[in-house]
Amino acid sequence: MENASPIRTLRPLAELDYHDARSVSLPVAVTALEAWNIMTTEPGLLLRLAFKTRDAISALFGVKRIAGFSGRQRTSAEVGDRLDFFLVEECAPDRLVLTARDRHLDVMICLSIASQVLTVTASVVTHNRFGRLYMLPVGPAHKLIVNGNLKRVKQALEKRAAPA
């Protein structure tokens, strides 16, 4: 049976160690991949600092550096492709599902669009103490970063929709 919900998570909500969903109404129609491109093309200062801090601290514990988002625009993506450090698990016009998994935690980011409302959902399952400690600062920071990214998508699309 097909999943009727446009939002995907790693597990049912009660089984997640972290869950957050944030939405914004969009002024024009856009695909999930286009929204991703807008969010990651020119990462803001907060996001760049967050990735540098993450990499510096995580490297002390043997965790691979991810270096943030490359800013590269994608015109298409298929299951199995990489969007920077994320693995594409699903790519449809209305939904982009990305994962990153390691021995400390599994992360799923789902960008879904329904009725011109973009929702970014993050779900995390931690596997050990480091994963739980990692999420203590990352959880609140993630909310701020997603809020900023949603605002940026809306503003970019408002400019695109404005009459010349």
Image (spheres, helix red, strand yellow):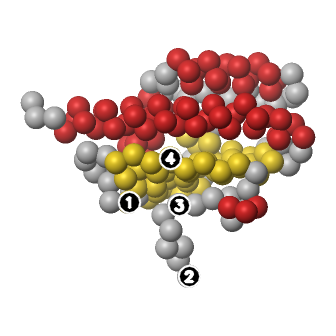
- Residue 7 marker: 3
Left or right of residue 58: residue 110:
left
Residue nearest the observer in this picture, 105 or 65 = 105
Front label number (3 vs 2): 3
Q: Residue furthest left?
A: 164
**Label 3 residue SS:** loop
Quick one: label 1, few (<14), some, or many (20+) residues within 10 Å? some
- Residue 22 marker: 4
> Residue at (46%, 34%) from the top-left corner?
149
Q: How far from the left and from the top, in percent, is residue 110?
A: 54, 52
User: CA separation, marks 4 and 3?
Assistant: 11 Å
Q: What is the three-letter code of the residue carrying label 1? A: Ala
User: CA separation, marks 3 and 2?
Assistant: 15 Å
Front label number (4 vs 2): 4
Q: Which residue is mark 1?
A: 114
Q: Earlier in the sequence, mark 2 or mark 1?
A: 2
Q: Which residue is mark 2?
A: 1
User: CA separation, marks 3 and 1?
Assistant: 10 Å
